[in-house]
Image (spheres, rainbow, N blue to C red):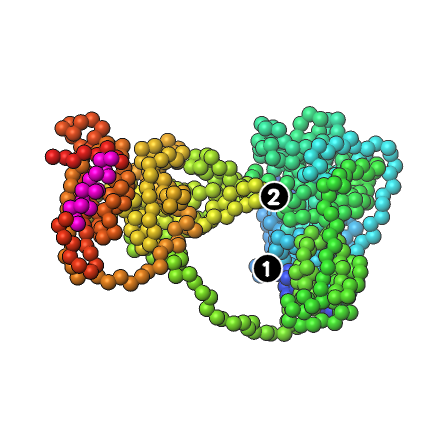
Amino acid sequence: MKFSEQWLREWVNPNLGSQELMDQITMAGLEVDGFEPVAGEFSGVVVGEVISAEPHPDADKLRVCQVSDGTNTVQVVCGAPNVRAGLKVPFAVVGAVLPGNFKIKKAKLRGQPSEGMLCSESELALSENHDGLMELPVDAPVGQDLADYLKLNDIAIDVDLTPNRSDCLSIKGVAREVGVLNSLLVEAPDIAPVEAVHSEVPDIRVEAPEGCPRYLGRVLRNVNLQAETPLWMQEKLRRSGIRSIDAAVDVTNYVMLELGQPMHAFDRDEISGGIIVRMAKAGEKLVLLDGQEVELTPETLLIADHQKPIAIAGVMGGEHSGVSPKTRDLVLESAYFDPITLAGKAREYGLHTDASHRFERGVDYQLARDAMERATRLLMDIVGGEPGEIVEVASQEHLPKARVIDLREKRLADVLGLAIDRTTVEEILSRLGLHIDKLLKDGWRISVPSFRPDISIEEDLIEEVGRIFGYNNLPVTEPTGSLGLRAREEAVRPLSAIRNFFVAQGYQEAVTYSFVDPKIQQLIDPEREGIALANPISADLSVMRTTLWSGLLKTVVHNQNRQQPRIRLFETGLRFEKNDGEIDQQPMLAGVVVGNQAPENWVNGRRTADFFDVKGELESLFRVLGIEIQFIASQHPALHPGQTAELLRDGEHVGWLGTLHPQVQKNLELNGTILMFELFLNSIVTGYVPNFKDISKFPEVRRDLAIIIGSDVAFAQVEHVARRHAGEHLTALRVFDVYEGESLGEGNRSLALSLFWQHPERTLNEDEVHSLFNGVIDALKEELGATLRS
């Protein structure tokens, strides 16, 4: 919010210097981002009047002018295209100093003497406009110092407001704050209803009341838009960073800066039938005031007539219905648009306007009528016109509801660290415009005004009291509290152990956004619908992730586009699902591996990582965590049908491991083999409690066997059966050979196993081992159909 200090002091004028004023509002939470003089530094410039302007005898583009400074008339040679007799302009007399230490001296231009200089706005550092001389009003007093006439002893203050303080996006709002801080009354302009002089009213229909709960319109006939905006209004707009365009646009901008209500003026003759506020239809197009054509999306709130769109609600009007010097009749618009409906719509079309900036943050829903009356009166004073009645269409159901909040005295003292006198608290609340409905035994019941949409809970009221009382006046207290160690379950492994494991394996930890591109997520996880954000940063970050793979694969794309062939990433974070109307946040662990298994060198070569490499790393992790996980062949929409494993713990699903599906990989434009895993953190962090166990002093016994078994039988089944029948003293079971060939028959394979037994207290005898070994063989034959290979 940029504004003129002088304009603010017209509303409220505390006995403070400029720097003190800026420091005060900064400490109240309205941070001053910077300030600058409203004009360059110059001297010797007065209001001059061009008495005559004759062509230069030796130059086609120059004029020889006679200029009066109120005392003398001198000759000045000027090349500005708009110089003419009777014009009043800034006149730098001989001896004047312009910005940049440019001194005015007597000179000759093409043989003609010139005593002084007629100035443009850019030459006085008022703006960058150098198209011609700065034209002053006809009643400007000739000879008066220009800085005094334009009141240029002023600064433009730029306040960087937080998004919740939309009430201060106006002179009225900032003045209200300054008045509260200094216990001063605010002198606001009197806004009286303008009496209608004709019966014509705009036909207004609101088809989207949830997006536009209130819409006001008024017809203003027989205006003269060739009339010039008064200099005082142009200057206030300029010092607020807004360029003067024409009287209609200037007045709506002025009211927006003054009161905080964005408005728009349509050319009535360009509106077919009436005004309809509705959602856009797919494929509709609109040429905006800045000349660009946009294709509207169905989520866009639209102002339309009976034939076509005429404006994007709360953002920008259309070129076709915009006002021009030929416009004779206006339709003024003043509305309240729902902030959530408008959130992000300007950015969606590559726009950011003063109106969208305010509507997205929340405008006073009771302000529209006052703004309409104010704009009507200003327009009539400048361009004339005949006003009609105001037509208002409102949906009370969809308008914000007035909020009532209880403020407890004890809670106020606890949060601020100071017990403030009740009378002082009540005075602060009243000055802020907060109405005290009822004095409670332990506090106050407060009604929140419509211009403070940011106040919704008790803590907001405490913040208001604290900042107006003065943060510097609050005591400095050091927090105290016990720092006792909390008990931690020994069986639960800390997240740091998992992170350290992957870093030791050569992975790098990634941290990606929790909100992702819905198109990428649909490819990876088509069975779950992401939770849409109400106000996304951009269209490709508009839903909450249902899997960590969405962000990791986007990171892989980013790295491969920068010629990184070997990528090993892991991430821990939340995924988000909606279950029975509630948002379920689940901690997850995910990883992705691309490229060589090991960094390329003279030893490692170029072997690409495969499914079993990643499986082995996960098995190592599970041994560190002290848990047993089964890998079961399965199917996942994002993974390759033949290279996908579901991970189970005690029969419960805990995650996935596999190779990215080729079609998904093609759509994401990824290269190489993409290996991925994702696990539920809560399901794997709890393992066993370590126990001491003596190392046996007695010899270990080994027996080997080779079995022929169906290729569809997983080794996990073989291991399970063997361990179940090998007895309690089995210490290890290993596969040392796998063979498939024609000699075994189609659909069969050979597994060679080694089984190890060791008793903790004695040496096992041959009969015991033989009995256990035969029991394993019999079980494999009976349960899995295995046969011994001869």
Image mark count = 2
Q: Nearer the viewer, residue 368 or 107?
A: 368
Secondary element under disc 2, as helix, strand or loop, is loop
Decide: is 410 above or below 750.
below
Decide: is 535 above or below 6.
above
Q: x and y percent of residue 790 in the render?
A: 11, 35
Residue 555 is at least partly visible in this image? no
User: Hey, which quadrant is residue 221 in on the image?
Assistant: top right
The residue beneath circle 2 is: 343
Q: Few, some or many C-alpha atoms within 10 Å of disc 2 (few <14, some 14-19, many ≥20)?
A: some
Q: x and y percent of residue 779 in the render?
A: 24, 39
Q: Earlier in the sequence, mark 2 or mark 1?
A: 1
- Would you say 390 lies left or right of 748 here? right
* Picture residue at 43% right of the left edge, 45% below the top: 548
Extent of the magenta region: 768-782
Q: Is residue 781 magenta?
A: yes
- Would you say 511 lies left or right of 691 here? right
Tell me the kind of residue under disc 1.
Answer: Asp
Q: Which residue is situated farthest in the top direction here?
A: 307
* Picture residue at 23% right of the left edge, 53% below the top: 729
Q: Nearer the viewer, residue 568 or 736?
A: 736
Decide: is 615 above or below 156.
above
* Picture residue at 85% right of the left edge, 48% below the top: 192
Quadrant of the image containing the N terminus: bottom right
Q: Nearer the viewer, residue 630 or 354?
A: 630
